[in-house]
Amino acid sequence: MATVTFDHATRLYPGTERPAVDQLNLHIEDGEFLVLVGPSGCGKSTSLRMLAGLEDVNGGHIFIGDRDVTDVQPKDRDIAMVFQNYALYPHMSVADNMGFALKIAGTPKADIRQRVEEAAKILDLTEYLDRKPKALSGGQRQRVAMGRAIVRQPQVFLMDEPLSNLDAKLRVQTRTQIASLQRRLGVTTVYVTHDQTEALTMGDRIAVLKDGLLQQVGTPRDMYDTPANVFVAGFIGSPAMNLGTFTVNNGLAEVGPARIPLEREVAAKITDADKGKITLGFRPEALEVTSQANESAFPVEVNIVEELGSDAFVYGTLKGDLATNADIHSGAGDNQIIVRVDPRNVPAKGERIYVAIRPGNTHIFSTATGLRLS
Amino acid sequence: MVQNLQITASAPDPALLDLPWDIPLEEWPDSVLAALPRGISRHIVRFVRLSGRVIAIKEIGESVAYREYELLRQLSRLDVPSVVPVGVITGRSDANGERLEAVLITEHLQFSLPYRALFSQALQPDTATRLIDALAVLLVRLHLIGFYWGDVSLSNTLFRRDAETFAAYLVDAETGDLHRELSPGQRSYDVDLARTNIIGELMDLSAGELLDEDIDEILVGDALVARYNELWDALTNAETFASDERWRVAARIERLNNLGFDVGELAITTDIDGTTVQIQPKVVDAGHHARRLLRLTGLDVQENQARRLLNDLDSYRAAAERQNDDEEFVAHDWLSGVFEPTIQAVPRDLRRKLQPAQLFHEILDHRWFISEKAGRDIPMPEATASYVENVLRHRPDEKAILGLAPGEVDRQE
């Protein structure tokens, strides 16, 4: 087992101007489950493939443990791409399906059996070892595929969107299995996904990338509570955070008719480049429905109510004075605000509700740089 | 339940709409299925008859389906032997409104054979070697255009007979990626994975007692790596020689032609004092003989079949003493005077068993065989009749290996 270190690792494709991965610095602890997440084209898969040896590294270095593997052939890196091959062989027993790569490598039979049995125990497959794959459920087959990687006892597991070709039910099930299995095995794992829910539920830490640049790395809680910039704020969380750019007047942000006071040290961080504006982020659950009398309340016209049983979300439009000056985005699109409301007391479509941000629940970003101010 | 199907296809066939999209593919009734042998797949795959042809349907995640569809289209455009994508269907739901998986549809490759069918027929003792050669050629061609396969295996390949050998086609591009150029790491990983997968697949056949006991799975896997490296080097290596050995340039081109590749471009560099020359092929196109035959006769066949047909055309030309005639005219006469009458002499119901070019190749072989036995030159019509009676009648139908009830076929996913 080992740590993994990206040290200013850069990948520049020939004929392109912007690196696909730009000076990535990332240290992954021994036994850690790290998720690389971001929209398509952000460089997450490229980063993983650089670690696997499938992409050249044009600048910087990559280490597995203390060993510089930047120029080492993929098969000599002691890593396993999990789920690379999970078609099971129908005539071979489950045990042979798990151990055949060891047989190819010339591992003695007794060792193979021992490693397969250990893996089967962890995977709850012991009683199936001598059966054919036909006898297995879909989930069990997934576990056999994991077993193939486990028996090789690599230093690092790599997984590139492993759930993308599973159906929705199996995806949720396998997600939980991979996460709990990784914790039991304690093998350093790098996992790539575009799905922030997958990232939040699986990773010890998450690294968010965009345009080849690392945006932030931290625990799921860090990413959710203190996103480092507007991009991470909007990317992590479902439904997504509401983000709006508002005019600041005398230390007050003008959110529709509401005036939201900014702390003095925050207001001091506003520069000329911000042109008198500030970007505020507030999650749907950070809003409470209140009355018009509340000074910091602003009106939202209900476009649609999404009822999920335990929760209900209002998708609406900011109304009132100065509302047109604001530039608001959310997961629902431009000019949409998402509000979590009491599922037992939902407003009607077209209704106007007044909402206020709960104290201490505002994320404040510089409009010019997108960086977190508070 | 109202379906909200979305079909993405370049030329959608309306008959697609009549298929039971509201039923999970695994439960489709035998009445719509074509009984073809299935390979080992991680997904559910079924073959279906549609408007007189056979299509392959694979249930797969929506984004992956669109991605693979696009990749297969690109590969077709690049002239790589691969299955032709028909389309993607999304928005399926069952009678209870439950969402069903998207599907990717490809055309079934006529006359193609999955490796499991080839092995279980116990064809010739060196089948494994010939399949590996075909796969090595395919892999090199894919790598030359910058395609990283990511899951090379016999299961993800289909084989078509090509004279004595096979031609391999890519049928699964799910894990693939098209790059500008592949790094040595990508190539070596792809080849290493191919080796592991092939050995695994052969071990599986062996466990099912479908493989000749004398075959050593690991040696076969190693042979792929060796063949691949040999071919890659022949096609890409720079060669250096003294400047008075210029004949080597022509020799290199001929060698590549003999391997079945055309040289589009050759980089020639000399050192400062001009005493040594370095040559390196830049663009290499496979199908040298196939293209020549296509140009001359309009016949679109596999590389080795083309080589065989061209040999016959050349001997026809020599026998008719028409070496000075325009090649195109001789080719036309050969086509209408030799090739077509031979094929037409095969009874229509037997003709579908093999591709015409393969039939012709086998008749040539048969003629050689009976001529030697008889000690005289047997004319084509006589050889054809003998071939039909003594060989073809006893051959399995390869247009689509039928005759297997769907229940008998591997239900393995």
Image (tube, coloured by chain):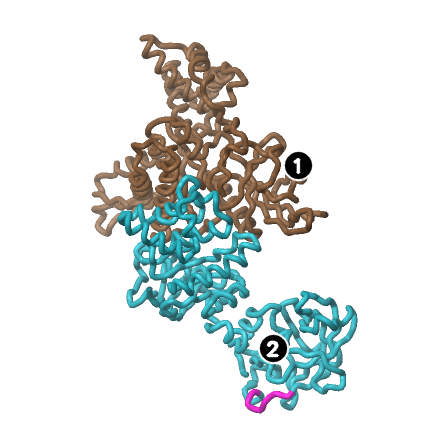
Chain colours: A cyan, B brown
Q: Is residue B233 above or below residue A293?
A: above
Range of magenta residues: A261-266
Q: Amino acid at mark 1?
A: Ala
Name the image quarter holding residue B47.
top right
Residue A265 is a magenta residue? yes
Residue assigned mark 2: A281
What separation in Å lies between label 1 and label 2 (alpha carbons)?
A: 51 Å
The chain carrying label 1 is B
Find residue A201 and report its horizontal and vertical position in percent: 51, 66
Check if mark 1's residue and mark 2's residue have beta carbons within 8 Å: no
Circle 2 Cα neighbour tier, 10 Å, few/some/many (<14 / 14–19 / ≥20): many
Q: Residue at x 53, y 57 (%)?
A: A173
Name the residue furthest front. Answer: A127
Parent chain of label 2: A
Residue found at x 41% / y 23%: B309
In the drawing, does residue A74 fall left or right of residue B240?
A: right
Tag 1, which secondary structure? helix
Above or below, B312 against B77 in this view is: above
Q: Residue at x 39, y 29 (%)?
A: B304
Are labels 1 and 2 on one chain? no
Quarter of the view holding residue A124: bottom left
Q: Secondary structure at mark 2?
A: strand
Q: Which mark is residue B15?
A: 1
Would you say B265 lies left or right of A107 here?
right
- Front residue of A220/A26: it is A220
Is residue B180 visible in the rendered structure shown here? no
